[in-house]
Amino acid sequence: MNRRALLALSAAALPAPRLLRAQEAFPARTITVLNGYPPGGVTDTASRVVAQRMERELGQSLVVENRPGGATSLASTQVAQARPDGYTLLMGTSTLAINPALQPSLTPREPMRELAPIGMVFRTAFVLHVHPSLPVNSVAELVAHARANPGRVNFGSSGTGAVNHLCLEMFRQQARIDVTHVPYRGGAPALLDLQAGRIQAMFAAVLEALPSVRDGRTRGLGISSLNRVSVLPDLPPVAETLPGYEGVFWQGLFAPAGTPAPVIARLATALGAATSDPALIARMAEQGVEIVNGDATVLRRTLEEDTVRWGRVVREGNIRPE
């Protein structure tokens, strides 16, 4: 074999120089992070504080853009279809696990195949709370009251298929009770009606329920996570009454499938630095949000487990979007 042929063979065995240089230089420009929710909520707040902290590690700006619509599928589809170079990311949430069963026509239809997990961002539980006029002071008493009064306890939610609605439906299925679901367009109007006594109960995110429970406008009975939360330490997990019960809302960072492993690793390192920052952890804990320092494996397992959990709840409850 002549010298020219040997050089050509050696070059073919090496990674493409342009691709290698691009990965080594990542990030060389601003990164866009899409969030499928409107501004102002906990997902938006967490997205921005985590992105700001990641900037310090990456040396580049991360711009968070709100793209609500289609039960968050507008944002997730845009990321799934983006160029897999690490410059378009998704702050994905529990809806990625819910939509395949609830609204199978929405894209991405296979989030675990179409998106690449980078790492966890946060988890937040829901408070099971009731209007003070309801004669119950514990989860067990609520179950007993609902069994004695089938169909007469009205549970609000922020909308059909929302995580707090599925927490209610899972509660109903496991407790074997008959209650009435009253869907609202968002958690705020449902909470107002609970405080006014127009509905009797609901699962609400800790951040939403906290002021109401603390000032006595509603009575907290339990928490939907397996562990207690620091801002409401007296509330026991619902699982103490209904073993195995768990329903939480989570958020994680994703890239398009096919994003190079070195780019994913660079982003994961920056995210890990953000989610282990004591100041950020303390700030979000005050809002009942648990920052989670979990890698891609943890995020993938969370998505897989919740896809099974919520898919079963949707099918057994015969839940259909409005």
Image: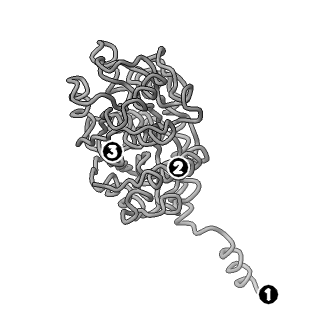
Q: Are marks 2 and 1 in contact (CB under 8 Å)?
A: no
Measured Cα–Cα span from mark 3 to mark 1 = 53 Å
Q: Residue at x 66, y 76 (%)?
A: 12
Does residue 76 sit above or below 202 in this rendering?
below
The crowding category of the residue bearing disc 1, from other C-alpha atoms within 10 Å (few below 14, some 14 to 19, many at least 20), is few
Query: Which quadrant of the figure contains the N terminus?
Result: bottom right
Task: Name the foreground residue: 219 vs 36.
Answer: 219
* Amino acid at dot 1: Met
Q: x%, y% of residue 131?
A: 29, 22
Circle number at residue 219? none
Foreground mark, 2 or 1, reads 2
Does residue 305 sit above or below 284 in this rendering?
below
- Counting residues from the N terminus, which is met first, the one under dot 2 or under dot 1? 1
Q: x%, y% of residue 154?
A: 30, 34
Foreground mark, 3 or 1, reads 3
* Amino acid at dot 3: Val
- Counting residues from the N terminus, which is met first, the one under dot 2 or under dot 3? 3
Circle number at residue 1? 1
Circle number at residue 303? 2
Task: Name the foreground residue: 31 vs 26.
Answer: 31
Choose top left, top right, bottom left or bottom right for residue 128: top left
